Each structure stands twice: as structure tokens, then as C-alpha cells.
């Protein structure tokens, strides 16, 4: 009886090892899903920045909804409302509130309306970014001062503005999440000023440290500010 070539044996063995590892990984994932089943039961939060069913914000919303969370959504403008509303309905949410994060008055009104629905919340997801699309076509060096300020205001500062209001609805603490992008670490074609924004978000843990420190101090003093941070 002739033995199969050594290369055939090693190839078969490698394929078997890969199959065993994949089977083990699938088993671990299934076990983790069982452990996490309902992990967000009783939790309420607001997701800001859903643009469509391919948005990371929507992926987060869908995942926490599957784990039992109740979710409120925000949108800016009629066009986004038409996209957000049917998605919200998919996860059983009837809280869809307009919010222009470049306006303190609008943010105040958003949380006033949210407060009418819920007394407290447990988390916020900030997935908002904006820049003039025309300025993403050229070179970063051509970025105008006006667009730079507006991009930073909406994409970066808005997280702090939202945290100010959200913290008041987190008497028992909670989570505040914001997102960044690979363009913060590597130069991406046509990403331009959004790269600077992403880098600022990448450094957002500094902002979060200050937010968390202040909010925890207020909570200890009984100031009712409570709220943790994540990002």
C-alpha cells in the first residue's frame, strides 16, 4: 500500500485543525450569546446618528434591542426622519425626536421631550459626524475656517453638549459612547477635515476622563449629575 504524499497529509491535517478551531469558536460564540441573552433588559437609551440600515449606529441599536433595551432615536431634517422612523419601528420604538446638535436650544428641547417619555436613561450612543461634502472632494489644505469650525462643532463638541443634558437623566450612572474611524490613524483619500475630526475623537478618552471625573464628583456630593462614560 502506497502512502499519500507528505504534502497531502500535511494539507489534510491543516484543514482538520482549521475545522476544529472554527468549531470551537462557533461553540464559544453560542455559549456567549446564551450568557448575554437579555443583558440589556430594563435598560433605556438614546441613539443619535442613525442615517440608514448600514449605519454603525443602527447596528448598535439593533444589537442592544435584541438584548432587551428600549431605545429612543433622534434625527435632523425631514430626509433623515424618513429613514430613521421605519428602522425605529423595527425595534419597537415609537420615540423619534428631532435634534439639531449645533444648537443648544434644540438639544435642550430634545431632552425635554425625552424626559416626558422617560424619567431616566442608562446610555447614550453618539454617532454623529458632519462636514460640507464639497470640501471633501479637494485637498485638506483647502479647508475653510467656517467648515472646520462647523465640522468640529457638530462632530466633536456635540458629544459634550449632549453629555451635559444626558447626565441629568442618569441618577444611577450610565454609559456614554461615541465613535471614531480609521481615518484618525491613517490618511484616507478625500477624508480631509474629517480625518482631523476622527483624530480628535480618537483622543476623546481625554474628554471622557474629564466628564467622568466631574460627573462622579457631583454624584458623590449628591448633586444629581451621575453618569459614567465609555467610548
Image (cartoon, rainbow, N blue to C red):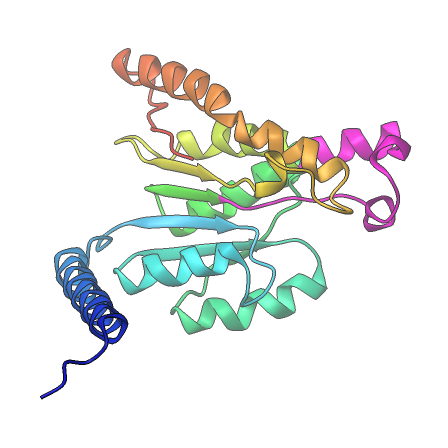
Q: Residue at x 48, y 60 (%)?
A: 58
Q: Residue at x 33, y 22 (%)?
A: 224
Where does the N terminus fall, quadrant-wise?
Answer: bottom left
Q: Name the residue nearer the viewer: 187 or 84.
A: 187
Q: Residue at x 37, y 23 (%)?
A: 225
Residue 182: where, in percent of width, then height? Answer: 57, 42
Q: Residue furthest bottom?
A: 1
Give yes or no for residue 127 being in the magenta stretch. yes
Q: Residue at x 61, y 30 (%)?
A: 199
Q: Name the residue nearer the viewer: 146 or 222.
A: 146
Where does the C terminus fall, quadrant-wise?
Answer: top left
Residue 186 visible? yes
Q: Name the residue nearer the viewer: 141 or 223.
A: 141
The answer to which image quadrant residue 200 occupies is: top right
**Segment tinted magenta in the rendering:** 126-154
Left or right, 207 with reference to 104 = left
Residue 119: where, in percent of width, then height? Answer: 34, 43
The answer to which image quadrant residue 33 occupies is: bottom left
Left or right, 67 with reference to 144 = left
Left or right, 73 with reference to 104 = left
Residue 103 visible? no
Q: Residue furthest left?
A: 1
Residue 56: where, in percent of width, then height? Answer: 50, 55
Q: Is residue 46 above or below residue 105?
A: below
Numbered label tally? 0
Q: Name the residue nearer the viewer: 42 or 22.
A: 22
Give yes or no for residue 176 being in the magenta stretch. no
Residue 93: where, in percent of width, then height? Answer: 42, 65
Amino acid at each position: 500500500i502506497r502512502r499519500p504524499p507528505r504534502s497531502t497529509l500535511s494539507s489534510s491535517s491543516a484543514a482538520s485543525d482549521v475545522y476544529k478551531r472554527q468549531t470551537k469558536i462557533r461553540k464559544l460564540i453560542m455559549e456567549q450569546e446564551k450568557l448575554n441573552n437579555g443583558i440589556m433588559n430594563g435598560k433605556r437609551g438614546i441613539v443619535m446618528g442613525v442615517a440608514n440600515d448600514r449605519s454603525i449606529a443602527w447596528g448598535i441599536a439593533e444589537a442592544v434591542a435584541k438584548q432587551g433595551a428600549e431605545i429612543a432615536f433622534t434625527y435632523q431634517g425631514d430626509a433623515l426622519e424618513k429613514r430613521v422612523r421605519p428602522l425605529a419601528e423595527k425595534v419597537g420604538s415609537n420615540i423619534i425626536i428631532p435634534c439639531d446638535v449645533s444648537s443648544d436650544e434644540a438639544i435642550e428641547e430634545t431632552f425635554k421631550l425625552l424626559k416626558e417619555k422617560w424619567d431616566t436613561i442608562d446610555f447614550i450612543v453618539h454617532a454623529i459626524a458632519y462636514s460640507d461634502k464639497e470640501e471633501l472632494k479637494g485637498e485638506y489644505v483647502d479647508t475653510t475656517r467656517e467648515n472646520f469650525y462647523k465640522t468640529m462643532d457638530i462632530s466633536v463638541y456635540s458629544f459634550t453638549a449632549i453629555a451635559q443634558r444626558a447626565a441629568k437623566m442618569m441618577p444611577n450612572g450610565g454609559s456614554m459612547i461615541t465613535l471614531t474611524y480609521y481615518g484618525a490613524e491613517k490618511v484616507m483619500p478625500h477624508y480631509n477635515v474629517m480625518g482631523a475630526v476622527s483624530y480628535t475623537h480618537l483622543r476623546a478618552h481625554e474628554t471622557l476622563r474629564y466628564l467622568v471625573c466631574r460627573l462622579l464628583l457631583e454624584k458623590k456630593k449628591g448633586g444629581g449629575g451621575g453618569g459614567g462614560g465609555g467610548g
